[in-house]
Image: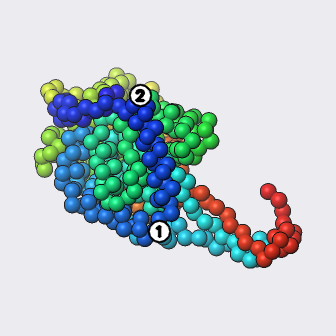
Amino acid sequence: MPIATTNPATGQVLKSYEPMSTEQIDAAIERADLAFRDLHRTTLAQRAQWMNAAADLLDAERDETARLMTTEMGKTYAAAKAEVTKCATACRFYAANAERMLADEPADAAAVQAKRAFVRYQPIGAVLAVMPWNFPLWQVMRFAAPALMAGNTGLLKHASNVPQTALYLEDVFRRAGFPEGAFTTLLVGSDAVDRILSDPRVRAATLTGSEGAGRSIAQIAGRELKKTVLELGGSDPFVVMPSADLDRAAEVATTARCQNNGQSCIAAKRFIVHTDVFDAFAGKFAANMAALRVGDPMDADTDVGPLASESGRDEIDAQVQDAVAHGATVLCGGEKPTGDGWFYPPTVVTDLNPQMRMWAEEVFGPVAGLYRVSSYGEAVAVANGTPFGLGANAWTTDPAEQERFATDLDAGNVFVNGMTTSYPELPFGGVKNSGYGRELSALGMREFCNTKTVWVGEGAATAGAGAHAE
């Protein structure tokens, strides 16, 4: 895939880049390694100063940066501006909280026959981040902010269709004051990842992307004995029970399905509705979806912009047509438009069955599948009946059902009566084929730290007395 900015609203190639040479890659890795030697010795106060400066730059340049993201991958301008603001918020969150998150944790010294015992969190070195295009700033920042604050350095292999956003991220951290090489964008194709991750100067990797990409990264890292964090997408359920506020549920469902033009790992994709309220919810939801305006993502009145690629649009159209061929009913949308740009209308499909691709596959666009269920147990069974487990929504005002959903839904994130989203304050990640490890919160910061046990005794005799080796 060429490394280029192609406007999804027009299909026009605006800017292209040559992939970095082997020599350029090696030089970038060396800079990252050298920068780590300096960065991890700086104080947290100094890193916080640089991170807050990065946040200030993001805020000051929000509109221009948002315009760039919209041009590169098609998200609405309003959504792009919100993404920039969220990144600045994350920078400030980690600047303010890293000292607490990385503080030594005392242990029970007497229980381990020590004078002192504690856990210390220390950075491990250069971390490779392989990132997707759909949230081109945020998905990088949720790794970069905690990693840099911990004292690690970052090597970014971004998606090939958002090169200018990738270069901007490097520039922001450089201008904020971080040492040269602390965060570097590698303009390379996926064929370079094996060589980069195999380099002994690169200590770990994080990836957000497809199952196939995750398996590839995990295979390389396993061979090299390196830590990985993987977020591999999802087919998130949105369960609606009889006690739910249907108007509110249908309103949030519309946003949850079509946020980012439907191209979000944690977008609700499978709408599992109790039969007692199925028809009422389906009518409200389909009406809301049909009312969304599709068009120029720079237009303030646009709700849904184009898909990021022509192949992505062709894929979701093929999934819809496959469902129709196997007996599905389309309540709204479902027809690929002609003309310039890779647009697709908000679509609601019902009467689904296991013969259809949509039953088990992730649909990465503004297409919703409706599933009718007759009980709580059936709702949970359908919700959990996919290989994915990233996010899940449940709508019910019954306190007992809320508690049961929180336990029974097989996902890394469960949101009750609200839309699944990510916050710097909360851990984010999945289970099953949605990956492993966590981003954000203190857990995300510590993923790329050496969790070091420190035991201090009174002397040699005390240290050895009654100790168990291992």
Q: Is residue 134 left or right of residue 345?
A: right
- The image quadrant of residue 465 is bottom right
Q: Position of residue 235 (x, y in %)?
A: 42, 41
Nearest to the observer: residue 270 or residue 184: 184
Q: Residue at x 17, y 40 (%)?
A: 294
Q: Is residue 118 above or below residue 238?
A: below
The crowding category of the residue bearing disc 2, from other C-alpha atoms within 10 Å (few below 14, some 14 to 19, many at least 20), is some
Q: Position of residue 271 (x, y in %)?
A: 38, 44
Q: Quadrant of the C terminus?
A: bottom right
Of the two numbered discs 2 and 1 on the same chain, state the one appearing first in sequence. 1
Q: Position of residue 98 (x, y in %)?
A: 46, 67
Q: Is residue 57 visible?
A: yes
Nearest to the observer: residue 269 or residue 144: 144
Q: Quadrant of the N terminus?
A: top left
Q: Nearer the viewer, mark 2 or mark 1?
A: 1
Q: Is residue 399 left or right of residue 457?
A: left
Between the residue at mark 2 and the residue at mark 1, the CA separation in whole angstroms equals 55 Å
Q: Which amino acid type is marked by label 2?
A: Met
- SS type, badge 2: loop
Q: Is residue 341 visible?
A: no
Q: Are marks 2 and 1 in contact (CB under 8 Å)?
A: no
Q: Is residue 254 above or below residue 396?
A: above
Q: Is residue 230 left or right of residue 163?
A: right
Residue labelled with disc 2:
356
Q: Position of residue 363 (x, y in %)?
A: 37, 36
Q: Is residue 2 left or right of residue 361?
A: left
Residue labelled with disc 1:
43
Q: Which amino acid type is marked by label 1?
A: Thr
